[in-house]
């Protein structure tokens, strides 16, 4: 729903999804920080995420959060599987809400990509040297026993009990996310994690009902979404992040994603978050040329053909660029990540660039002082008019 005046730039029109209203169309994309302690967020996360809410973003997604501690990529990733972790997240969501932002959590399970070091260590597999410092490796699970790279650890092939358990973990994580104060849940079905491992024929070699043709490979994702939607309040949004195409090897296509998006919509997903890559190689490896807005064509086609709202991310850095994507109805939400790391007040600056008062998007303790500065500048435009005491 959009009841904003037609003169308001699309980027700053409110958006209501189910019972949740975003103050604008700017979303903070999940950004893994590798700063969790005992799988719980810390003061780092409070400050990292808090400044985006203070800067005017409409929806602040916390980073990919594992549904269990054993499904994390690294020891430094967060989870939402214990009461202590819920309390730590609640402290953060309370602050984000106090600054006017809607809160989102991305739930994930790394599957075969567990037990690694941080990205700045090349996501190297944990080994005996890590075990000696209390970080022993563990075996991942996957739809098929296909390692991430030749010679790497072989994941255990999931049986039907494992499938039911992973779905149940997502359900419990969704319930805990509600307790933790989140308004939006996003299922991480991209970047080579367990959902995409089932979707892609590169990693899903099964011959039972969870493999084979497209409906078989989608079955796990759709059952997981159905169960999560049933556990999540009917008046709160459910998003799904999709790798619209695979990475190297190219077993999953945009045509497949359009079909999947239609099935997700039928099961209560409200927004498809459009990304790409990751099934083979680094987590976000894309076969798409890295040009500004490189995922927008995916978002546009899925929105048009599946009839579901979409969120676009990927080298969106300028206010006019983001606003145009929305004005042209190519997507419904704009997500930023690294640009917000560089400029957490990007929403306020974007508003100013689009003819609005950017200070309206900043907290009063900032806006008041900055308005005073502007008043002084108007009185003394050259700085020479004011007499020196």
Image (cartoon, grey):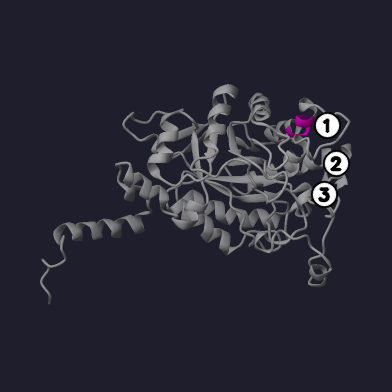
Q: Magenta stretch?
A: 217-221
Q: How far apart are marks 3 and 2 (CA)?
A: 9 Å
Image location (x, y in percent) of residue 157? 88, 43
> CB of mark 3 within 8 Å of CB of mark 2?
no
> Are there few (<14), some (14-19), or many (20+) residues within 10 Å of tag 3?
some
Residue 237 can be seen in this image: no
Which corner quadrant of the image does residue 170 belong to? top right
Residue under the point 62% across and 57% down: 88
Which corner quadrant of the image does residue 239 belong to? top right
At numbered mark 1, what does the secondary structure look like: helix, strand or loop?
Answer: loop
Residue, disc 1? 211
Front label number (3 vs 2): 3
Numbered badge on residue 147: 3
Placement of 331 over or under 138, stated as above or below: above
Earlier in the chain: of badge 3 and badge 1, it is: 3
> Are there few (<14), some (14-19), or many (20+) residues within 10 Å of tag 1?
many
Residue, disc 2? 144
Q: Does the magenta stretch include residue 297?
A: no
């Amino acid at each position: 729903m959009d009841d904003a005046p037609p003169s308001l730039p699309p980027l700053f029109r409110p958006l209501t999804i189910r019972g949740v209203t975003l103050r604008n169309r700017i979303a903070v994309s999940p950004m893994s920080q590798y700063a969790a302690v005992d799988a719980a967020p810390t003061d780092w996360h409070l400050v990292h995420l808090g400044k985006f809410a203070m800067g005017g973003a409409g929806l602040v997604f916390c980073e990919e959060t594992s549904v269990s501690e054993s499904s994390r990529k690294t020891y430094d990733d967060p989870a939402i599987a214990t009461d202590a972790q819920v309390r730590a997240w609640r402290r953060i969501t309370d602050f984000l809400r106090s600054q006017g932002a809607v809160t989102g959590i991305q739930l994930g399970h790394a599957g075969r990509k567990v037990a690694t070091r941080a990205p700045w260590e090349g996501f190297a597999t944990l080994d005996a040297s890590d075990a000696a410092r209390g970080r022993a490796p563990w075996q991942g699970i996957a739809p098929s026993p296909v390692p991430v790279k030749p010679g790497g650890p072989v994941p255990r092939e999931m049986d039907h009990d494992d499938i039911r358990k992973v779905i149940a973990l997502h359900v419990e994580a969704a319930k805990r996310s509600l307790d933790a104060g989140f308004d939006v849940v996003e299922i991480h079905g991209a970047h080579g994690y367990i959902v995409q491992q089932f979707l892609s024929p590169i990693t899903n070699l099964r011959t039972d009902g969870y493999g084979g043709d497209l409906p078989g490979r989608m079955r796990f994702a759709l059952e997981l979404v159905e169960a999560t939607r049933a556990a999540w309040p009917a008046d709160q949004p459910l998003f799904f992040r999709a790798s619209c195409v695979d990475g190297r090897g190219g077993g999953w296509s945009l045509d497949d994603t359009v079909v999947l998006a239609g099935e997700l919509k039928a099961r209560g997903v409200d927004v498809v978050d459009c990304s790409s890559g990751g099934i083979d190689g680094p987590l976000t490896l894309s076969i798409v040329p890295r040009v500004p807005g490189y995922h927008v064509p995916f978002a546009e086609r899925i929105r048009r053909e599946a009839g579901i709202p979409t969120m676009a991310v990927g080298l969106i850095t300028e206010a006019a660029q983001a606003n145009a994507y929305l004005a042209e109805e190519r997507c419904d939400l704009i997500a930023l990540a690294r640009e917000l790391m560089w400029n957490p007040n990007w929403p306020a600056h974007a508003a100013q660039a689009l003819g609005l008062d950017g200070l309206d998007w900043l907290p009063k303790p900032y806006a008041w002082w900055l308005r005073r500065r502007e008043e002084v500048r108007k009185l003394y435009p050259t700085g020479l008019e004011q007499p020196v005491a």
